[in-house]
Amino acid sequence: MWTVTVGLTCLLAMLPEQSGKISIENPRLLYGVPGLPRASNKFAHGDNFYLAFDIKGVKSDAEGKVSYSLLTEVMVDGRLEFKHESKDIDAIDSLGGNVLPGFTQLNIGMDQPDGKYTVKVTATEKKTKAAASIVQEFILNKAELGIVRIRTTADRDEKVATAIFSTGEDLWLNLSIVGFARDKAKQPNLKISMEILDSNGKPTVQKPPVAEISKGVAEDLDLLPLQFYISLNRAGKFTVKLKVVDQISGKNSSVDIPLEVSSAK
């Protein structure tokens, strides 16, 4: 099943279509909103699909207020499978420029059929009735071992999402593991590691953190959540390499995530 969230805030198959005087531009797949850029349009069961974009050409009133709606449609093989409309979204164009950031989020169910999906997002300005749409394709892989629901937050409780990082700050990398096997005792046996490389491809520490999970996991748990902590002690461009090894099935899965840290001002 699908659930959806829309609001304000790679491999793109974008087919823009516009009517009126607004447009949707700069579409990008992200790990959360706000979140780090996602390079691949391939997703796993239990994952979250985040598509962010800019709505340009909006007309605000004298106080900078803008009202619009967002329609999200999910299609497979040309057939409409899911539809959700947020009819009353009010925003403030405080900084001017006639542009608003928007996003749509889809929560992909564990029982969703694999295949190629098309997501169409349509923004309609309520006052002028001007509308614009974008189309984004993504591939839902067959159910298998994977790292999903990656989000970066400034706190351990995952309440403050962030994608802009400065030295001296704390960063929590949140994720979940899906598709893992279980032994006769109904427990997994997983090793999840996080290695950070600098801009020259050199590991930042000699012994990267590794989480080992082999007990205490509920039998009905399909998504296994965990966190890694990153201290942002210096500026630079880095690559975060996440890897999970299933020691029961012998399978493994990995994800590389770009990370840029700026000097605090």
Image (spheres, helix red, strand yellow):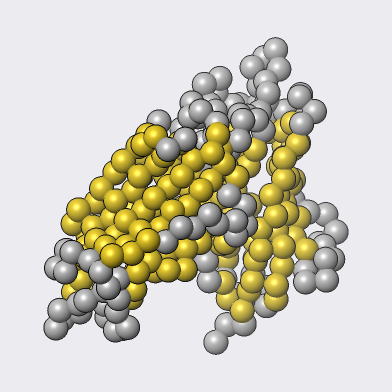
The residue located at (61%, 35%) in the rendering is 141
The residue located at (77%, 71%) in the rendering is 199
| 56 vs 164, nearest the viewer | 56
Q: How many marks?
A: 0
| 241 vs 75, nearest the viewer | 75
Residue 103 makes an appearance in the image: no
The residue located at (20%, 71%) in the rendering is 66
Q: Is residue 252 left or right of residue 11?
A: right
Q: Is residue 234 above or below residue 144?
A: below
* Residue 248 figure quarter: top right
Residue 102, position as x, y percentages in the image:
36, 63
Residue 208, position as x, y percentages in the image:
78, 54
Q: In this view, does 177 lie above or below 184?
A: below
Residue 196, position as x, y percentages in the image:
75, 60
Residue 255, position as x, y percentages in the image:
69, 49
Q: Give the position of the N terminus as an image quadrant.
A: top left
